[in-house]
Image: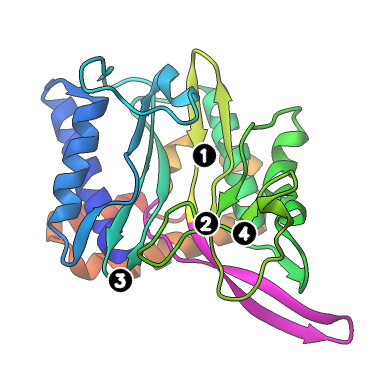
Amino acid sequence: MRKDGVALLRLFRWLEAQLKAEVGVTEAGLALQLIVFRSEQSDYVGESFPAIVGYNANGAIVHYHPDPDHSAVIYPEGILLLDSGGQYLQGTTDITRTIALSDPTPQQQLDFTLVLKGHINLAMAQFPEGANGIQIDTYARQPLWRYGLNYGHGTGHGVGFFLNVHEPPQGFAPSVGRGSTVIEPGMLTSNEPGLYRTGQYGIRTENLVVCERADKTEFGAFLRFRTISLFPIDRRLIAENILNKEEMIWLNEYHAEVWKALSPLLTAEEQHWLAEQTQPL
């Protein structure tokens, strides 16, 4: 996860420089450049799946993959969604970040923050042993449901150890099948709620979480999740007034963990960039 975080950091810094220099970058070109940065990390073998790079309206297409011959050019305006993963000898990654390329609108901030609230709800969940993915899926949807919003895919899938990035049997989903599996300690699963406005933009925030034992009381054993993906969440897209105190603490603690894990692997300039991205709210 540290290696993957470094590769993503270098990609987004590279994209910023290209946009500032007014050099045209396509969605497909960005995906190829990410492979370059990941391949610089030791024990990297290849992508865990072809990167989903959705600029503005293309981000609203849930499983969109850019066509090298008909790929949108990215400009310093709007929103970019990047869902990607790598295969390293130490494990498999899958991470999604949605970033603002210009000043976001209030609607974009609201949408992004509701998705983030759902992501944090699931990340902080504590639940009784025996709970399944259907039950846990609702943690991520509740903030969106309160606004009459939803998304049409599962909230998470199993991830194998240097195996399949979409690996059964578990997952967080609203229907039987993958969602019926009981969540057990040791399972590695994605946490990726989203929101998609057709013809405008897509938003998704994804980290991988490991299920662990939490507590045992007179009411039985309880489990929780530990987030292990390591990359900042774009603070520019957050409507801070919508986050409650507990959610803000989680985000600040997560960013502190990202800084602690990644900063020793970075140059001074890269550390400065990361410090800006992980400032507490």
Q: Position of residue 75 (x, y in %)?
A: 26, 19
Labels 1 and 4: the sequence-earlier one: 4
Q: Provide the major secondary structure of the magenta segment.
A: strand
Quadrant location of the N terminus in the rendered image? bottom left
**In the rendered image, which residue does mark 3 sit on?**
90
- Whether 211 is among the magenta residues is yes
Q: Amino acid at mark 2?
A: Leu
The type of residue carrying mark 1 is Ile
Sequence-wise first label, 4 or 3: 3
Question: Reading the chain from its start, which is encountered first: label 2 or label 3?
Answer: 3
Please name the residue that numbered disc 2 is placed on: 251
**Which residue is labeled 4 in the image?**
170
For badge 3, the amino acid type reads Gln
What is the distance, in whole Å, between disc 2 and disc 3 at their CAs?
26 Å
Left or right of residue 68: residue 181: right
Is the residue 161 above or below the residue 33 in the image? below
Binning the other alpha carbons within 10 Å of mark 4 as few (below 14), some (14 to 19) or many (20 upward) gives many
Give the mark, 1 or 3, whose residue is nearer the N terminus: 3
Circle 3: is it few (<14), some (14-19), or many (20+) Cα within 10 Å? few
**Which of labels 2 and 3 is toward the front?**
3
Q: Secondary structure at mark 1?
A: loop
Q: Which residue is mark 1?
A: 238
Q: CA distance from mark 1 to mark 4?
A: 30 Å
Bin the neighbour count of mark 1 within 10 Å (Cα to Cα): few under 14, some 14-19, many 20 and up.
many
Way the structure is coloured: rainbow
Label 2 to label 4, Cα distance in Å? 26 Å
User: Which range is magenta?
Assistant: 208-232
CB under 8 Å between discs 1 and 4:
no
**Does label 2 or label 1 sit earlier along the sequence?**
1
At x 70%, y 56%, the residue is 133
Q: Tell whether label 1 touches label 2 (CB within 8 Å).
A: yes
Residues at badges 2 and 4 in contact (C-beta under 8 Å)?
A: no
